[in-house]
Image (spheres, rainbow, N blue to C red):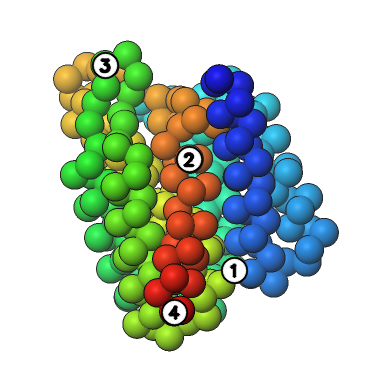
Amino acid sequence: MEYFVRVMISLLSIITVFMCLYVLSISFTESIIISILYVTAIISSSRYRIRALNNLFINIGGGLAPLVMAIAQTILLIHVIKLYEYVLLLILSIFIVYLSSKYIPGKGIGIPLILPIVAIAALVCLYIELMDLPILYSMPTAYTVAVYSTLIGADTLKALELIRKNIKLEIGGEKLLDLIVISSSITPPITIALLIIGNQ
């Protein structure tokens, strides 16, 4: 069952990243290649981690790879996003994830998957509508917000609280099944679905 879930998350990640890059004017072929390389990088580098603090590690595949992809998409989005409004969207999303997240002994930091993701998707929809941006730009916007809010709201802020209690944590430690990868793969499709339903 876990193998099936990993395959499904891999395929969903490839499709989501492909759509985000293609919307951001990367060619069809390049978008496909980058998407496949991205998921391959997550899988192949997930056994490696780097130490951030004494008891805090960052998994290269599950933590660093999604961050690099989010930064790349943010750079491509810079000419479209309204900076102050985007930062407000990000702060609200971080707040939602922070309030939703909790420490699960032996597993790390977790969140109830659906509620925060739908809340973030709804916020991105509101942002896209208020800023009068094309619907397709909701994909990369939702991707970047999902990665940053999960990394900051759940992993970093909660982790800083926990490592003071001498608890060892690894950001992105669940690899393909980590919150960062899952939320960034699921939030963009939900966002565009909500926008399409809302505009009918």
Mark 4 vs mark 1, foreground winner is 4
Mark 2 vs mark 1, foreground winner is 2
Which numbered disc flags the more N-terminal residue, 4 or 3? 3
Q: Secondary structure at mark 1?
A: helix
User: Which residue does the numbered mark 1 point to in the structure image?
Assistant: 76
Which numbered disc flags the more N-terminal residue, 2 or 1? 1
Three-letter residue code for mark 4: Asn
User: Which residue does the numbered mark 2 point to in the structure image?
Assistant: 182
Disc number for residue 199: 4
Which numbered disc flags the more N-terminal residue, 4 or 1? 1
Residue at 79% in and 58% down: 30
Residue at 46% in and 32% down: 178
Three-letter residue code for mark 1: Leu
Mark 4 vs mark 2, foreground winner is 4
Three-letter residue code for mark 3: Pro
The reply to whether dot 3 and dot 2 touch (C-beta < 8 Å) is: no
Disc number for residue 158: none
Residue 108: give x, y in percent of width and height. Answer: 33, 23
Q: Secondary structure at mark 2?
A: helix
Marks 4/3: CA–CA distance = 43 Å
Marks 4/2: CA–CA distance = 26 Å
Marks 3/1: CA–CA distance = 38 Å
Q: Quadrant of residue 170?
A: top left
- Does residue 141 show up? no
In-image side of 47 versus 108 (left or right): right
Position of the N terminus, as image quadrant, is top right
User: Which residue does the numbered mark 3 point to in the structure image?
Assistant: 105
Residue 188: give x, y in percent of width and height. Answer: 49, 58
Query: From the viewer's perspective, is residue 137 above or below residue 13?
Result: below
Q: Residues within 10 Å of mark 1 (few under 14, many from 20)?
A: some
Q: Residues within 10 Å of mark 3 (few under 14, many from 20)?
A: few
Marks 4/1: CA–CA distance = 26 Å
